Image (cartoon, grey):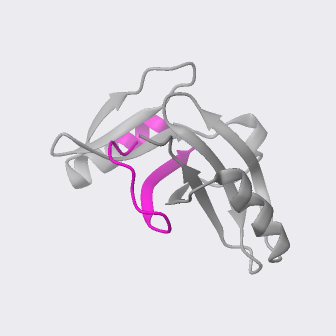
């Protein structure tokens, strides 16, 4: 994830959820020259690096995600993930994945706007 906390309201991370991590990793490495590196932790997660800098991440689709197709998810920085998730429902959107901690990274949620478009929201610890 980002080392400097991005400004609230800006896109800060891109993540590929895929049914085949190896095949997708080979594709993007060959296409864009990205390097792949395992991120330490309990869940298998691959960092995608461009010129040695984090460009995004990749993980296998988990069973609790259902039968969703492989896709890219963009994340937007927010001040407080829980407050943002509450406001989403007040504004007619839907919380798809409830606010959840990512150890050593921050707290995220996945939402859908009133038209059904999904995006991730994430807050980072204050430095």
Question: Residue at image x 55%, y 47%?
Answer: 17
Tell me the magenta residue range.
1-25
Disc tally is 0
Question: Residue at image x 54%, y 39%?
Answer: 106
Question: Residue at image x 43%, y 43%?
Answer: 57
| Image coordinates for residue 98, horizontal then vertical, percent | 77, 48
Name of the residue lying farthest toward the bottom: 115
| Image coordinates for residue 28, horizontal then vertical, percent | 32, 49
Q: Is residue 127 above or below residue 73?
A: above
Which image quarter is the N terminus in?
top left
- 99 drawn magenta: no
- Residue 60 in the figure: left or right of residue 38: right
| Image coordinates for residue 26, horizontal then vertical, percent | 33, 41
Name of the residue lying farthest toward the front: 127
Name of the residue lying farthest toward the left: 51
Q: Is residue 83 above or below residue 43?
A: below
Say if residue 88 shows up in the picture: yes
Which image quarter is the C terminus in?
top left
Is 84 or 20 nearer to us in this picture? 84
Q: Is residue 27 above or below residue 36?
A: below
Say if residue 19 shows up in the picture: no
- Residue 125 in the figure: left or right of residue 5: right
Question: Residue at image x 52%, y 58%?
Answer: 75
- Residue 42 in the figure: left or right of residue 115: left
């Amino acid at each position: 994830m980002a080392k400097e906390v991005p400004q609230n309201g800006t896109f800060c991370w891109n993540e590929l959820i895929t049914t085949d991590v190896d095949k997708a990793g080979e594709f993007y490495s060959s296409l864009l020259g990205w390097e792949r590196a395992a991120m330490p932790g309990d869940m298998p997660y691959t960092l995608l690096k461009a010129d040695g800098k984090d460009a995004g991440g990749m993980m296998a689709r988990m069973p609790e995600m259902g039968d969703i197709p492989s896709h890219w998810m963009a994340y937007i920085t927010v001040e407080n993930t829980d407050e943002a998730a509450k406001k989403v429902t007040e504004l007619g959107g839907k919380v798809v994945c409830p606010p959840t901690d990512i150890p050593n990274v921050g707290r995220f949620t996945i939402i859908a706007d009133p038209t059904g478009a999904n995006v991730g929201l994430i807050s980072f610890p204050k430095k």
